[in-house]
Image (cartoon, rainbow, N blue to C red):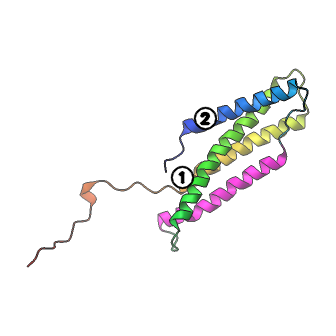
């Protein structure tokens, strides 16, 4: 599995921001109430980020050799994929939150201050999930193998005597 590219995260953030902004415009222009991001979203995103990092720590210990218990490689791969997905979802949600914040600040009449703070909290929580996903992905990464031929173990001499 390859590491998450920064360009992917930036593009997901931009897409989330555009979608969040235009959904708010569409709702407001049709007379519907705009989306107010709940505080439970922010709490859940931060908790999910913490859980992802906690799940990745035993994998990192096994890679470094400080954990005497063997780790199931399928479990390690699942946690690495979860970390990658968390970083992508975090980028997307941070973008949506930022799009909502930009929409709220671009209006002539600013809606309730609580809506603005909830959108800011969702943006920050999405960024925290993004960071936790990247940290967990780094923890699940194997160190590069030594490809220097000078450091290889010599083959045993198996001549028939």
* Residue at disc 2, secondary structure: helix
Question: Which residue appears farthest toward the left when viewing the image?
Answer: 161
Of residues 86 and 26, the one drawn nearer to the viewer in this rendering: 26
- Relative side of 79 to 119, left or right: left
Q: Nearer the viewer, mark 1 or mark 2?
A: 2
Q: Quadrant of the C terminus?
A: bottom left
- Relative side of 9 to 18, left or right: left
Residue 130 percent across, percent down from the top left: 65, 45
Magenta range is 38-65
The crowding category of the residue bearing disc 2, from other C-alpha atoms within 10 Å (few below 14, some 14 to 19, many at least 20), is: some
Q: Identify the residue shown where x is 73% and y is 50%.
A: 45
- Would you place residue 61 above or below residue 125 in this image? below
* Residue at disc 1, secondary structure: helix
Is residue 1 in sight in this rendering? yes
Question: Which residue appears farthest toward the bottom when viewing the image?
Answer: 161
Of residues 116 and 103, the one drawn nearer to the viewer in this rendering: 103
Task: Pick whichever of labels 1 and 2 is earlier in the sequence.
Answer: 2
Q: Identify the residue shown where x is 54% and y is 44%.
A: 4
Query: Label 1 vs label 2: CA separation?
Result: 18 Å
According to the picture, the residue beneath numbered tag 1 turns out to be 138
Residue 41 percent across, percent down from the top left: 79, 47
Residue 119 percent across, percent down from the top left: 80, 38
Residue 107 magenta = no
Residue 64 percent across, percent down from the top left: 48, 64
According to the picture, the residue beneath numbered tag 2 turns out to be 10
Q: Quadrant of residue 21?
A: top right
The crowding category of the residue bearing disc 1, from other C-alpha atoms within 10 Å (few below 14, some 14 to 19, many at least 20), is: some
Of residues 39 and 2, the one drawn nearer to the viewer in this rendering: 2
Residue 51 magenta = yes
Q: Identify the residue shown where x is 69% and y is 56%.
A: 50
């Amino acid at each position: 599995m390859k590491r998450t590219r920064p360009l992917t995260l930036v593009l997901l953030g931009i897409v989330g921001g555009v979608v969040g902004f235009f959904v708010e415009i569409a709702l407001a222009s049709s007379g519907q109430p705009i989306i107010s991001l709940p505080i439970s979203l922010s709490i859940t995103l931060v908790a999910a980020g913490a859980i992802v990092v906690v799940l990745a720590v035993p994998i990192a210990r096994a890679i470094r050799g400080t954990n005497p218990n063997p780790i199931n490689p399928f479990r390690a791969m699942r946690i690495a994929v979860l970390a990658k997905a968390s970083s992508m979802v975090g980028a997307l949600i941070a973008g949506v939150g930022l799009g909502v914040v930009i929409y709220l600040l671009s209006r002539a009449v600013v809606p309730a201050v609580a809506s603005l703070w909830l959108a800011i909290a969702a943006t920050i929580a999405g960024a925290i999930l993004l960071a936790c996903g990247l940290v967990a992905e780094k923890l699940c990464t194997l160190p590069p193998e030594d490809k220097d031929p000078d450091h290889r173990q010599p083959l045993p001499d198996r001549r028939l005597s």
